[in-house]
Amino acid sequence: MAANPNPLGQRLARLTREGDLYERLEKERVRCFACGHRCLIPPGQQGICKVRFNDGGVLQVPTGYVAALQLDPVEKKPFFHALPGAKALSFGMLGCDFHCSYCFVPGTEVTTSGGSRTIEALFASGDEVFGTERESVAVSVGVEVLTHKHRARRVKGVFRHQYEGPLMAIRPVSGPEIHTTPDHEFLVVARAARGSPAPNFFMPASGITPEFDLLEPRSDGTFWRRPLEETWVTTYRGPVYNLEVEEDHTYLVNGAAVHNCQNWLTSQALRDSAAVALPKEVTAAEIVRLAHEHGARILTSTYNEPLITSEWAVEVFRAAKGSGLVCSYVSNGNGTPEVLNYLRPHVSLYKVDLKSFRDRHYRDLGGTLETVLWTIRKLHEMGFWVEIVTLVIPGFNDSNEELSEIARFLVSVSPEIPWHVTAFHKDYKMQDPDDTPVRTLLRAAEIGAREGLAFVYVGNIPGAVGPWENTYCPGCRALLIERVGYRVLKNRVGAGTCPECGRSIPGFWGQKVESPAS
Ligand code: SF4
């Protein structure tokens, strides 16, 4: 692997070992299956998460450090049906597999109403440039570009920033290659559907293979198909560009229709040096010792996306085995069969963030809704104790329709899966939506209950949501666990039954999961 010029990158490259969750392919390429991206990684390159890399045909993965270590009540994870009031020692590494950056390298041709121009020439044609050397935007560009509807629409701004990380290279059967950040969405159609009507949809570059054709709009409202020869991951360091386009929010690069930039950013230490916590070297045995010293009963892999560092989590959980600690994952649910089988012997509790029921939102984040739904269903089938969290964001996922769809899906897995609807507080770089009003959360909770979920909780607004922080028996409505925020005031569940009517209450109350109804 080429030397990483960044001291943090050099340190992280040293804290690695050969991974378990991958296969070797010809020409020293590897396929990683630690998360739903299933990156095909050529030698010398990183996966989309940037923490796993191919060193001469061997996949190297993170080990032996933590970037964060913290003791919290288990309710903060949140698990409400697992050892109420217990302390959980949480550890995290660096990196994430969901992110969002919609950029192209210099030389990428954009179709304007006056012909083709490189993306950096569009930036240079702006009358005014704001920002810094690292990040800037050119406005008053005075150019219209063609959109996926074959309409000329004004460019509102051209953004340029410095980028270092994976790129997707896309080689069409004819025409120039396209080099783009992995999340950038292209309008595609499944190749198998040639000759028959099939839906066109936007797909992140990271998921595009020769199984799909890119689409170029024609003036009559139909599309040319642009078949692909090959796609692969490469890396890049230097300036990248993207556009924001009025109204249609799309433009054409090298003829192919793509979404314009999105500002939906997730916290990603490796992509934002301001957010980096320095890694601290530690052994698995030391983490386990710390957990016992601090009276923790639970170990949790969290903070970064734990799937991408599963080998390290399992190393820590193996060290914990036999010492009575319960092991858990707090994850985005972008799973694979291989990683879930790998985790099953070690992980008892699994929290999934179900961010939305709209695939386009997941695609904006670099994943797919289908994978997350599959993961939730599979986790339940495999006997993990599963709790689901939805951060309710005004204008993003708070419609009655979408909340009902989420609740109905969960009921279809099990009506007894706990669903936490939590408040969004303006945070990090996400500027647009407002904080979630209490009434929105109460509406979400009522929708969950109406759709048939037995355990719905409202989080992040302690003391203001009435009964929605407590657990009640679905049989006789007796109060079982009383909470304010993360504090347990009363716990009457005992070994997993209602003390009033004797009904079994699903959860992890001791050393094994009391299965929820399916
Ligand atoms: S963990 Fe996911 S994103 Fe990272 S290399 Fe593996 S498949 Fe790619």
Image (spheres, grey):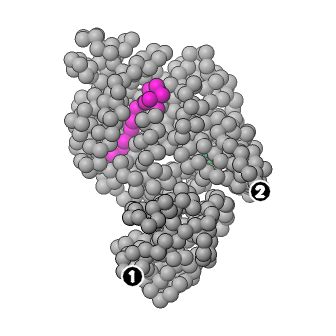
User: Residue at coordinates 52% horizontally, 41% vertically from top-left?
Assistant: 335
Q: How many labels sit on residues?
A: 2
Between 502 and 489, the residue placed more toward the observer is: 502
User: Residue at coordinates 64% horizontally, 39% vertically from top-left?
Assistant: 21
Between 139 and 331, the residue placed more toward the observer is: 331
x and y percentages locating residue 247 in the rendered image: 35, 73
Closer to the eye: label 1 or 2: 1
Could you tell me if residue 23 is visible in this image? Answer: yes
x and y percentages locating residue 400 in the rendered image: 24, 47
Apparent side of residue 387 relative to residue 64 in the rendered image (left or right)? left
Q: Is residue 342 above or below residue 405?
A: above
Magenta segment range? Answer: 379-393
Apparent side of residue 360 relative to residue 137 in the rendered image (left or right)? left
Query: What is the crowding at mark 1: few (fewer than 14 residues within 10 Å), some, or many (at least 20)?
Result: few
Does 356 appear in magenta?
no
x and y percentages locating residue 180 in the rendered image: 58, 66
User: Residue at coordinates 39% horizontally, 62% vertically from top-left?
Assistant: 199
Q: Mark 2 points at which residue?
A: 2
Q: Name the residue under label 1.
A: 219
Label 2, secondary structure: give it: loop
Apparent side of residue 74 relative to residue 280 in the rendered image (left or right)? left
Could you tell me how far apart the alpha carbons at marks 1 and 2 are, in whole angstroms? 46 Å
Between 151 and 491, the residue placed more toward the observer is: 151
Q: Is residue 109 above or below residue 297?
A: below
Does 386 appear in magenta?
yes
